[in-house]
Image (spheres, rainbow, N blue to C red):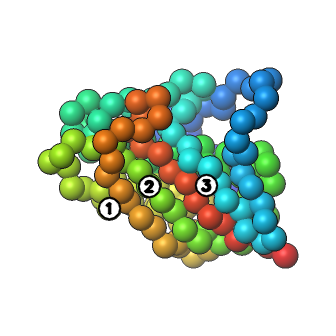
Amino acid sequence: MDRQKYEEIKQSLGFKPAPASSGPRVILPVRVEGNLAYVSGHVPFSGGELLYKGRIGVDVSIEEAKKSAALSVINCLESLDREIGLDKVDKILKVNGFLSCADHVTEHPVIMNAGSEVLIGVFGSSGEHARAALGIHTLPLGSSTEVDMIVSLKA
């Protein structure tokens, strides 16, 4: 895990930490079972603000969608870091990318590659993963992307 690279990627994407939440949690951001961590779906928040709202190909360009996917991955990693620590990650096993796209958009893999590149940049070969990139009609809060993942943890 390359913490310096991680901080550089966050800065390049304009990531700002969210304000602390004081309310009760309805879902867990990360669920650990044995040596696996299941990371709930995350959207592209920065500083408590949802970025890149709308449908890809209508409201959001392909280039903006790539940033949205990368930022969604960063938010997954932020939850992992807060809940268990990124230093405890052994490998990224599986990533699911959900993309709110107009019917004519077919660049799902290209868009999600931006998120995959974050993981490989931070974890090297341990960041290589299986992946799905799915185009769907809508996402929570009008987000253009949502990402969840399964991660193996060091013993």
Q: Residue at x 49, y 73 (%)?
A: 130
Relative to 118, does residue 55 appear above or below in the rendering? above
* Residue 54 appears left or right of 4: left
Tell me the quadrant of the picture where the C terminus can be found.
Answer: bottom right
The amino acid at mark 3 is Lys
Secondary element at image label 1: helix
Secondary element at image label 2: strand
- The crowd level at tag 2 (other Cα within 10 Å; few <14, some 14-19, many 20+) is many
- The crowd level at tag 3 (other Cα within 10 Å; few <14, some 14-19, many 20+) is some
The residue at which mark 3 appears reads as 5
Q: Please name whichever residue, 118 or 72, is drawn nearer the observer in this view of the structure.
A: 72
Q: On residue 109, which mark appears?
A: 1
The amino acid at mark 1 is Pro
Q: Residue at x 51, y 62 (%)?
A: 95
Task: Single out the mark in the foreground, 3 or 1.
Answer: 1
Q: On residue 53, which mark appears?
A: none
Q: Please name whichever residue, 35 or 63, is drawn nearer the observer in this view of the structure.
A: 35
